[in-house]
Amino acid sequence: MDRGPWTKRKREKNMTKEYEVAKVSEIAPGTAKQVEVDGEPIAIFNLDGQFYAISDTCSHAQASLSEGEIENGVVTCPWHGAKFDIKTGKNLSMPAPVPVQAYPIKIEGDVIKIVV
Ligand code: FES
């Protein structure tokens, strides 16, 4: 039975891919690195040995969040100072109007993978 385009969309939505994006040894604790997945810049953060990935593009005016200051699990946008929760991408202060996307990460040995 043909269920039409909705079924196809749902199937595509449930498909995930893993991308090798960096090595653990490349990102020191308290720092970040910009990587690219399918043309999208993503920021990987090392918070005391735990890795997190959020969109690298600030939701205000597209600054690179991987260049922001990192403190207590929060990154401050280098352009106008909006703050984001590194673990969730939640916008914590203006002028960022909305959150940024957070991505699951997998660590396999020294390899960091992003799941999209
Ligand atoms: S570009 Fe990030 S706060 Fe303006």
Image (cartoon, helix red, strand yellow):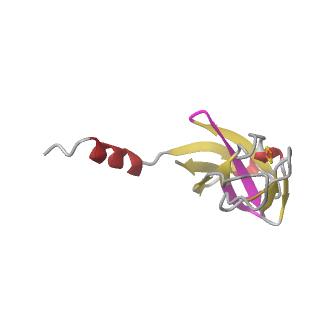
- Asked if residue 63 lies left or right of residue 115, the reply is right
**Residue 51 is covered by the magenta coloring:** yes
Measured as percent of width and height from the top left, residue 13 is found at 40, 48
**Residue 50 coordinates in the image, percent (x, y):** 70, 63
Quick one: which residue is furthest to the top in this view? 39
Which residue is found at the position 81% from the left and 54% from the top?
Answer: 82
Residue farthest to the left, as pictured:
1
Q: Position of residue 114 (x, y in %)?
A: 58, 49
- Count the labels in the image: 0
Magenta stretch: helix, strand or loop mostly: strand
Query: In the displayed structure, does residue 109 sit left or right of residue 76?
Result: left
Question: Where are the magenta residues, as a range?
Answer: 38-52
In this rendering, the answer to whether 107 lies above or below 63 is below
The residue drawn where x is 70% and y is 52% is 97
Q: Residue at x 70, y 50 (%)?
A: 44
Q: Is residue 12 above or below residue 50?
A: above
95 left or right, relative to 18: right
Q: Is residue 46 magenta?
A: yes
Image position, residue 63 (x, y; %): 78, 41
